[in-house]
Image (tube, rainbow, N blue to C red):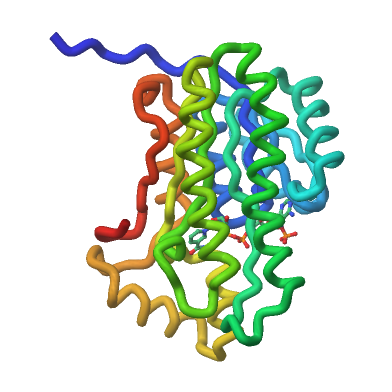
Amino acid sequence: MTEVPAPSAQRTAVVTGAARGIGAAVAVRLAADGHRVAVLDLHEEDTAGTVEAINTSGGTAVGVGADVSDAAAVDAAVSRIAGELGAPTILVNNAGILRDNLLFKMTETDWDAVLGVHLRGAFLMSRAVQVHQVREKWGRIVNLSSTSALGNRGQANYAAAKAGLQGFTKTLAIELGRYNVTVNAVAPGFIETDMTRATAERIGVPFEDFVRHTAAEIPVGRAGTPADIAAAASFFIREEASFVSGQVLYAAGGPKG
Ligand code: NAP
């Protein structure tokens, strides 16, 4: 007979880059799932909208400012979150930037910036949060990869970071499994956010045309939304997903990977 899973316990979640876009949707979704949420972004004041959206719908959220690529800032942020909301045992590594260019025009600064936020940031945040996960003998880490991990013109830095996050995900799943910590990745396809709006601007195409043109290539016939990605992250974080670890879920409206 199939057992109905027990509802998930309330935990403390940290979502990076949660001032807007996918991170904001993930933060709101995890709050709706019953968790306390630390809404982390570069500048604390930018988190006010997400924090208010959660708190006014009966959830519990605090805004935290930190650069995820700065080890001291990350450690201070995670300590503050543990003090204010309780041990953070859910981490969504979502903060990200783009510095697109063809290889021959890509500067070292643009390479380092992208690897710094996506890869080093995920490493520093995970290292700080795993202390609490190991102590609590329970945890969830969800990393934001991308279909760009499979290769994308003009994104050597971003593709390397997003492919790197997949190896990082699988390795942490092996190391942390014994502590009841699962580690998975969501790899979105095209999602309508400020990030894709900036890409349209850079290539000089009106955003609406960019979305329409991209959606025509997607099997389900539409662009993705931040809520689509929040739903995928929410699945990995559920109690009943405890046997799913080290996986990369392409959420792209069609087959990828
Ligand atoms: P977004 O709208 O640009 O939001 C990214 C957020 O991350 C911003 O609030 C940004 O803050 C913050 N951030 C940047 N650097 C940071 C740092 N060093 N420390 C802390 N926060 C930082 O991006 P998005 O489209 O929602 O994307 C979210 C994640 O999904 C990224 O990892 C992205 O690579 C991935 N993804 C997106 C798509 C897509 O189509 N949109 C597809 C695949 C994967 P500021 O505003 O201050 O810069």
Residue at the outermost bottom position: 204
- Image quarter of residue 65: top right
**Relative side of 176 to 234, left or right:** right
Q: Is residue 201 visible?
A: no
| Quadrant in the rendering for residue 160 | bottom right
Quadrant placement of the N terminus: top left
Write the residue at 76% across / 28% down: 81
Residue 127 x/y as whole percent: 68, 32
- From what the image shows, is residue 90 above or below residue 192? above
Q: Note whether 134 is above or below 145 in the view shown.
A: above
Residue 92 sits above or below residue 149 on the image = above
Would residue 227 be found to the left or right of residue 240 on screen? right
Give the number of marks.
0
Q: What residue sits 61% from the left and 86% below the top?
A: 104
In x, y percent, where is residue 42? 78, 52
Q: Is residue 222 visible?
A: yes
Does residue 57 appear to the left or right of 248 in the view shown? Answer: right
Choose between 145 and 42: the one closer to the eye: 145
Q: Quadrant of residue 201?
A: bottom right
10, above or below 79, in the image: above
Q: Nearer the viewer, residue 224 or 178?
A: 178
Q: Quadrant of ligand 1?
A: bottom right
- Residue at the outermost left position: 1
Quadrant of the drawing holding the C terminus: bottom left
| Residue occupying the point 72% across, 43% down | 40
* Residue 85 drawn at (x, y percent): 73, 22
Residue ID at (50%, 36%): 171
Closer to us: 90 or 150: 150
Q: Where does residue 177 sit, x and y in percent of width and height?
A: 47, 21
